Image: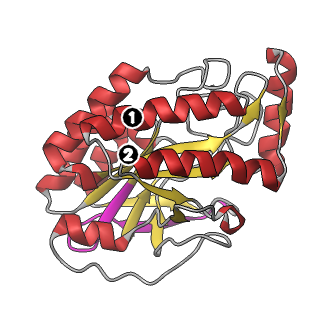
Amino acid sequence: MIISASYRTDLPAYHGRWFLERLAAGDVAVPNPYSGTPSLVSLHPSRVSGYVFWTRDPQPFLEALAVVRGQGVPFVVQMSLTGYPGLLEPRRIGLGPALRVMAEIRRLYGPRALVWRYDPVLITSETPPAFHRQQFARLAHAVARQGLADEVVVSWFHPYRKAQVRLNHLARSGGFSWRDPDETEKRALLGDMAAEATALGLRFSVCAQAAMDVPGSQAATCIDAQRLSDLGGRLIAAKPKPQRPGCGCAEARDIGAYDTCHRGCVMCYATRGVGRSG
């Protein structure tokens, strides 16, 4: 089984010690996100074909990555880096430290071990379309110049109800506004970003939003058995298991829990109550 760690929290940034403890124990009890009923998931190297780690800051997790590699299990780090202002990402990692830790992962494990994510794309009074065009170009040039990743994954903010409630509350208290652009505006922005990435030799992938298939883009496979196979030097067979329409992911088991991230991003879908992630 491929293990996802985690859609539900920034496990590498905040729960690395817990992960190492569970890795040493060989299993983890994962609560069902709806019923709360736990189920046991094996983390024994013979039972895990690969890991996908999701984070905005992998620096605290470098020790854990070394332990996973020592077990002979391949992994991919899906690292989100947008450079949003602190009003939207109050505990963001700075560009300099972000690029340095990306460079360290590349040095230790190669460019296939890390995927850069510019997501979610959120239009606010603080981050209008012009901000995204400039910021994406700036980050893409930095990533491509140093060969830190070979792919960038982009997705639009999806206004899930709990995310809208949280965002509306924090927008009022923070004094900013936000909007969900129409499809034409979204495609225009993604088209410019795709052209920028392609010119720099970065694969431009759109996550689970089939209507956003602009020229130069392709559907993202975030849980990517082929990438894990390349990194592990052996075939990792995993059946497709999309999370929603347009998703290209392979089957995986997530071991995280909602409401356990402390980053406080205003667009977060994994923290159910306003302010609970802070």
Q: Name the amino acid type tagged 1.
A: His
Q: Which residue is mark 1?
A: 141
Q: Is residue 40 magenta?
A: yes
Q: Nearer the viewer, residue 204 or 108?
A: 204
Looking at the image, which residue is at 68% across and 61% down? 212
Q: Quadrant of the N terminus?
A: bottom left
Residue 1 shows up from this direction: no
Q: Position of residue 208 (x, y in %)?
A: 62, 64
Residue 138 shows up from this direction: yes
Q: Which residue is mark 2?
A: 200
Q: Is residue 258 magenta?
A: no
Please identify the quarter of the rendering in which residue 262 is found: top right
Q: Secondary structure at mark 1?
A: helix
Q: Examine the rendered structure and indicate whether residue 28 appears above or below residue 63.
A: below
Q: Are marks 2 and 1 in contact (CB under 8 Å)?
A: yes
Q: Name the amino acid type tagged 2.
A: Leu
Q: Position of residue 76 (x, y in %)?
A: 32, 55
Q: Position of residue 143 (x, y in %)?
A: 35, 37
Highlighted range, magenta: 36-52
State how far apart marks 2 and 1 are (Cα): 7 Å
How many numbered discs sit on the rendered protein? 2
Which circle marks residue 56 in the picture? none
Q: Quadrant of the C terminus?
A: top right
Looking at the image, which residue is at 38% across and 57% down? 52
